[in-house]
Image: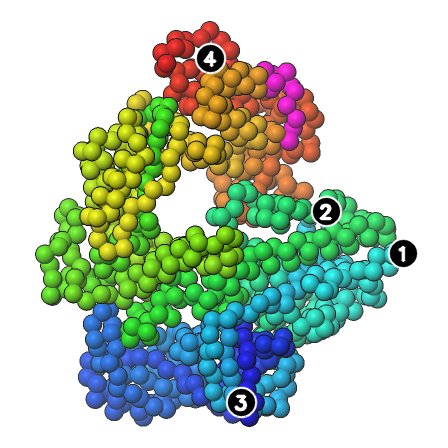
Amino acid sequence: MAKIRFFPLDATYKIVEEKPIIYLYGRTSDGKQICITDDSFRPYFYIIPKDLEKVQEKITKLEIERERITASVTDIEVIKKKYNGKETKLLKVYTNVPGAVPVIKDAVKNWEFVKSVHEYDILFARRYMIDKGIIPFTSYEVEGDFVNIKSRVPVFKAEKIEQTGEDVLQEPKVLAFDIETYFKQDQILPDKNPIIMFAFYAKDYRKVFTWKRFKTDDETIEFVESELELIEKFNEVIDHVKPEIITGYFSDGFDFPYLESRASKYKIKLDIGLDHSDVKINRKGDFNAKITGINHVDVLRYIQRLFGRSLDTESYSLNSVAEELLGEKKLEVDLDQMSDDWDKGINIEKYCKYNLQDSKLTYQLCNKLLPNMIELVKIVGLPIDDIIRMGFSQLVEWYLLRQAPRFNEIAPNKPLPEEIGRRREETYRGAFVFEPKPGFYKNIVVFDFRSLYPSIISSHNISGGTLNCDCCGKDKVPLEGKDMWFCKKEKGFLPSVIGNLIEHRVRIKEIIRKQEEPDKLLSARENNIKLLANSFYGYFGFFAARWYSLESAQSTTAYGRYYIHKVIDKAEKEGFTVLYSDTDSVFMLLDNKTKQDANKYMESINLELPGLMELEYEGHYPAGIFVPTKEKGIGAKKKYALINDKGVLKVKGFETVRRNWSKISKELQEQVLNLILKDDDVEKALELTKKTIKDLVDKKVPIDKLIIKTQITKEINAYENIGPHVAIAKRMESQGKTIVPGTIIKYVVTDRGDKIRDKAKLPEEVKNNEYDSDYYINNQVIPAIEKIFEVLGYSKDDLKGKEQSNLGKFF
């Protein structure tokens, strides 16, 4: 019997001789791919009975014939678990195969002596990983014997699997790929147009394959005789490189579906799975491609679902993301010319280099983001190609499903469509906002609560299972019109889980704080725990959540408002001027007080806070500006700019973060804010504004600074009002280009035409002096800085250089 140390990466199952067998694919400690099988695990679900004995008696005889399976009950256990916080006697019902679980469940759910059925919809391989504690990318020791079955990798039948520590697989083998296809007028037609080349990029492997020959000294370029051979080469490369991760950029939605379509034309199997199975493409909803034994990471999908909010870029294109994260860009080629060049057999090499660069950027991005992905895998406990395709509410749910057995809890069921509809109608009051008075301020300190909502949930034991218990009732939720409380005697499942997350994050932050160079994996883990913990509050109110609890969501925000009021009231009693507060933070003017006074205030607040709640010092800002709303005298919520002690600008809610503002507007606004807040030079900021306006009038501004970007949010035909971006999108569609929701439309407003939509042109169609100066002055530049100067006593006319109006009134 062999002893093998390995890192599991993927899990699936097969039915062999009417028995389910788990297949764990991974890599051994010496870098070889391997498969471990386990036939000891049985599928099951739970029944909460009204009459336990009657259910037992009837269900043991149950056997149901279906077209493909015979579903039967193989065993029953009477056990005790907690359901919604209360200990419950229930039945654990084992079936012969995983496919029998939903069949048996459907048969028994309406029996008069069955109260409810549970955990019947957890996929068998995931159920195995949860129950056995299998965490992908971490180290396990297996004892087992070699099994001689058809497989691309050695297979061992496990007799014993044990975790050997928290070692993480270092440098999994990543292979990036990218395909280029023949097209005319941007029409993507996989049933007609061939793949003309594809590129691979790995640590020790980089190649471009194409089937049109030309003279070249580039050793990375190889030729095949036809598209058929090109697709066969794809399979060969995967088998040769043996990656643990295959990565692409939009490979779920484009590369793999296109490749599959072309392969089917030639009756070629894309059987690159480690069990010789084909790539499986799920076309329901968002496309996704699955490869048995190999993790498929679509970098774009990860960015769209989870990582994008961390980026500054306005576009998730490969070029934009690579430029921000890597400092590199795609090669510039005219893709509209590629098919014509292909037909003529010219310039093919430059497209090969373009193709290889795309795969290189994808490879580098995957490796750059891999620490974040792996740490999320370790926290939630699912394979990486499942994790990257989930939203935050799904991550919370799967984290809870993994934690539930540790707390002896069974999960509530997913809501039915009618319940989802009802939940969608339910609303609750959000956070308290202390509205700022518009103005220019100096000497500001900011405090915020550490993980406010997660710490409230943990500290006040908020969950559906602890709501309105029989043993408590004195400490009511501070919510007018509601009579609610949460148990003080027994900690609930969700509050315990979230409390553990907060404490774990605090420990990690302390370790990072002591490090001279922060550990990337630790930093990624800390950030992922923060994101997961902060998602719990939203999960309570998410209409599709298993652990949905409107009362918990209401109570969380009610306590949030209560504590913010407490912080504000105490600050004012101690002589601080409260400038602004929103959700979990408070801005105060020091005036004649010191930073030490502010810290003493913070410490006194923390002595009064329960549990894991803590007010933290966020920073000191020498200057800040809060702009007004349309209603005079009221500051806009979340719309301010601050400069910190290091001279770094912090901007919230201004147009700099909006996509549909041109570069000239964004740059001017940032420069104006720096001049006012950092240099304390209002006059210079005013001069810069006037000069920018004059340059626009004199047609001196380059076109690239006037491009406006707007996202298409729905199907083009669904727009009732035709704005400039919709008009441009319609023109692009008429030229054969594909426009879908999410497409970023770029345009410039010219001086030709009557309506704005008629004046809008594609950037490449515009000459330097053809833009509409008045439009950019009145709709881009002035709106970007008008409110800033209004706070300082300047009018719109002052900005345009007209007669000034009482400039000194502010000072």
The segment highlighted magenta reads 693-704
Residue 798's label in the rendered image is 4
Residue 52: in magenta span: no
**Given contact means CB atoms under 8 Å apart, are the residues at marks 3 and 4 in contact?**
no
Which residue is the site of mark 1? 215
Which image quarter is the C terminus in? top left
Q: Nearer the viewer, mark 2 or mark 3?
A: 3
**Given contact means CB atoms under 8 Å apart, are the residues at marks 3 and 1 in contact?**
no
| Residue at 52% from the left image edge and 88% from the top image edge | 143
Amino acid carrying label 3: it is Gly
Which residue is the site of mark 3? 144
Q: Nearer the viewer, mark 3 or mark 4?
A: 3
Residue 701: in magenta span: yes
- As measured in the structure, the alpha-carbon distance from the residue carrying label 3 to the one carrying label 4 is 82 Å
- As measured in the structure, the alpha-carbon distance from the residue carrying label 2 to the one carrying label 3 is 50 Å
| Residue at 53% from the left image edge and 19% from the top image edge | 689
What kind of element bears circle 1? loop
Vertical placement of residue 769 versus 425, above or below: above
What kind of element bears circle 2? loop
Query: Is any atom of residue 582 visible in this view?
Result: no
| Residue at 64% from the left image edge and 31% from the top image edge | 704
Residue 331's label in the rendered image is 2
Amino acid carrying label 4: it is Asp
Query: Is any atom of residue 160 visible in this view?
Result: yes
